[in-house]
Amino acid sequence: MTQPIYQIPNEVRDFAEKSVEQARKAFEGFTGSAQKAFGSVETSTVSFQSGAKDVAVKAFGYAEANVNAAFDLAQKLVQAKDPQEVLRLQADFLKAQVEAVQEQAKELGALVQKATINKP
């Protein structure tokens, strides 16, 4: 018995691709504004500690990277040819994200430890 072929209509695929791209652009605008806000906090607050700033900037960078990875996955999913490809893409994404989050947590832990050891 042959399996039914999974087809996404081109109109739906085009709409999904445009939606992902619009969401990505909106997120990029948000991250640009947030980065400017980090910069203004640094310059306007005398007591803002370097270690705390490093942790915040690093955490924000990780969040941005993780959201961009999710956008990349969404872009790949709307271009998937069949359910098997969707499952493979999701499994690959999950594996990569687990590894990334573990590394991010390790690096953030080291930064937090450094910030608390070097506080004035």
Image: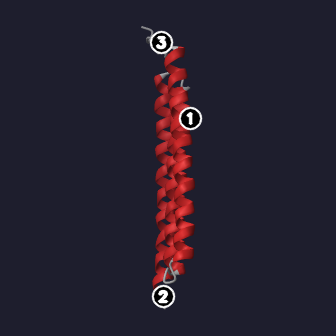
Q: How is the image coloured?
A: secondary structure
The residue sitting at 49% across, 64% down in the picture is 59
- In the rendered view, tell whether residue 44 sits above or below residue 117: above
Q: Gap between marks 2 and 1, in whole Å? A: 42 Å
Q: Nearer the viewer, mark 2 or mark 1?
A: 1
Q: Gap between marks 3 and 1, in whole Å? A: 27 Å
Residue at image mark 1:
21
Q: Secondary structure at mark 1?
A: helix
State the residue lying farthest toward the top.
1
How many other residues sit within 10 Å of disc 3, few (<14), some (14-19) or many (≥20)? few
Q: Gap between marks 2 and 3, in whole Å? A: 61 Å
Q: Amino acid at mark 2?
A: Lys
Indicate the position of residue 62 as horizontal and vertical percent values.
Answer: 52, 58
Residue at image mark 3:
5
- Earlier along the polypeptide chain: callout 2 or callout 3? 3
Indicate the position of residue 117 as horizontal and vertical percent values.
Answer: 48, 87
Q: Amino acid at mark 3?
A: Ile
Q: Decide: marks 2, 3 in contact (CB < 8 A)?
A: no
Indicate the position of residue 47 as horizontal and vertical percent values.
Answer: 48, 84
Residue at image mark 2:
119
